Amino acid sequence: MNSRYDDYYDPRGNYGSGDLYDDVRDDGYEDRGAYEPAGGDYDSSFGEDWDSYDSAAEDYDRPRRRKGGRKTGARSGRTSASSGRGSSAGKRRSGTGRRRKRRRNSLLPVLAIVLLVLILGGSFGVRLYLDKYSYSKEKADLNDEYGITDDSDVAIVWGNEYSDVRARIFDGAVYMDLDSVRANLNDRFYYGVQNEADTTGMILYALPTQLVSTQVGSSEVSGADGTVQTDYVPARREGDTIYLALDFVKQYTNFTYELYTEPNRLQLDNTWETQQVATVTKDTQIRESGGIKSAIMEEVKKGDQVTVLDQMDTWSRVKSGDAILGYIENKRLKDITDVDPAPANGYQEPEYTTVRLDGKVNMAFHNVYSTEASIDTLSTYMAPTKTVNVLAPTWFWVTSNAGDMSSFASQQYVDTAHGMGLQVWAAVNNFESQELPDHNTFLTTLDSRSHLIDQLISECTAYGIDGINVDLEQIDSAYGHDYIEFIRELSIACRDHQLVLSVDDYPAYDFNSHYDIAEQGVFCDYVVIMGYDEHYAGSQEAGSVSSIGYVTDGIRMALDKVPKDKVINAVPFYSRIWKTQGGTVSSEAYGMQDIQNYISEHGMTVSWDAATGQNYTEASDGDTLVQIWVEDAQSLKEKLDVMAADDIAGVAEWKLSFETPDVWDVIAAYMGS
């Protein structure tokens, strides 16, 4: 409780901040015109008195003339003098009275001047005092404060701060542009087209077992369970921008929003951290900044609650219950307490089920170029292996932008592999076909994606294939959304047919972020990191194919985004022989045995390079520098030790027939660890 002195002075400098003072101050400030001087009347009376004073002074100061001579006028002069003294005395007394009267009259203007000065000074002082210590009654322009541009524009207070993101009101519903929804609320919403002839477009949302869709501009939403009519348009186009209704987004995302008007503003929350809340002690104002001269943002009432964002010496930054941000005096707040807001739980994320092997995965890639070759080499290539439990034959490749594909699938191969106790996860790629115009376009329409998925599922069900391995490479970042949508849609089909879905990925450096391994980790059963091609055929410098640092980084970056029981690291069974001549760098890839033969034939000596975790050798052949970072059993053990320490799901090898037999003992030790 404030003391009575608080009504006049706050020791921190807030003069006149109490209730009693506020009333007196405001009254005085409003009636300050009463202190204006009556200048016209004063000037007139003062002029008249001054003229009278000048006339009297002139009479008083004029010298008198003597009458008669001394001889003849002596006696009579005395008599006259005698009689004249009385007369003269009377005259002097009369003159003194007149002079006193004149003096009194002459003081009146002086007093008037003094009084006028006091009045003027007092009025000016009161005005200065009120101007300095009175609270501003100026109202802030909230439309300007919130940057409102038109009637459809809506500012957003996201959590407790102004957001750069804007919302819009169309036909009474609140919308946000698709890019902002994806960046801030839910990046699973995908905009695309049915086919090349589709100029309207659609929004797709992938759930574990169905694909939800709505045409832009339509009020219908379709899925596996049928079509639902909504009382708003879930997706609409304004100019070149696609907007999603927030009520539609809320069906698949947990957040809350509340719309306020005058000005249009949205309170939006999708996180629920502990907040400080205070109660307002009396009617007061939230101001634009911390000061009594700051413009008023909003009037608040006694008993209102505000969220305290930052408490300073005499003011606090707060947010009102209707999303007004500003400042309020600390003395107007009480009962500041921590509150944990109740999170939104209107949407329950469904379970994206997975199909996984018991224990670690040991997946060997079998690179084949025909159906016959895959059958002929299967038994030979598998003979020296140990602990392999999955084969990934390179059977499928995309051949057209319409999503057509070719296949080397073989029933005999599948049956033979199953007879060996192996699963078959057939690989599909986008780089083997000479007919495919580019690596990306087949991903851009729903029809082409669906056509490719239908063929993959058909081949798997026809031959009893256990899973699909996706090896789509060289995807341009502009097609990242199309790529990950293909993975989502393929996962729905794989889940429906109990097929294992694995996806091959480059290490998740920023320049590969469009592959979105975090989303893959939700929809896929396994994410395979290709821990090789650190230096590749087109590299402008010689270097390791798979240094220990590169492998470690690839695994750790994956684990930041994908559960460890879904992460597989693929190791190379090959090295590159690098040749540098006249500043030109070239290389060729060889299997482990061929590398050993080359080193032996050229009399080269290897030494262990701890920095790369590999054996290294170099030699000069005329003016050509030859360099080799060797992959062998020793370098593979370095990589497998990292994988074991990080407890990931398993290992993959590229490719069968490139290895030396001793590597299988190292891999078997890892599988048994």
Image: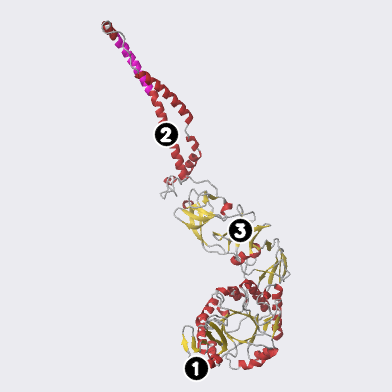
What is the magenta range?
Answer: 83-103
Find out whether residue 355 is within the magenta segment.
no
Front one among 476 and 299 = 476
Distance (Cα) linking label 3 and label 1: 77 Å
Query: Considering the numbered disc 3 on the image, is that residue within a helix, a strand or a loop?
Result: strand
Look at label 3 and name its amino acid.
Answer: Glu
Tell me the residue at 61%/72% (across/down): 477
Front one among 488 and 22 = 488
- The x and y percentages for residue 405 are 70, 81
* Rendered image: mark on residue 117: 2
Q: Main secondary structure of the magenta part?
A: helix
Q: Determine crowd level at label 2: few under 14, some 14-19, many 20+ residues with C-alpha closer than 10 A.
A: few
Front of the two marks 3 and 1: 1
Mark toward the start of the polypeptide (2 vs 3): 2
Asked if residue 61 can be seen in this view, the reply is: yes
Tell me the residue at 56%/64% (across/down): 271
Q: Determine crowd level at label 3: few under 14, some 14-19, many 20+ residues with C-alpha closer than 10 A.
A: few
Look at label 1 and name its amino acid.
Answer: Gly
- The x and y percentages for residue 486 are 66, 75
Look at label 2 and name its amino acid.
Answer: Val
- The x and y percentages for residue 488 are 65, 74
Q: Which residue is mark 1?
A: 603
Find out whether residue 93 is within the magenta segment.
yes
Q: Is residue 452 left or right of residue 46?
A: right
Front one among 493 and 47 = 47
Distance (Cα) linking label 2 and label 3: 59 Å
> In the rendered image, which quarter is residue 400 located in?
bottom right
Asked if residue 350 can be seen in this view, the reply is: no
Tell me the residue at 28%/9% (across/down): 82
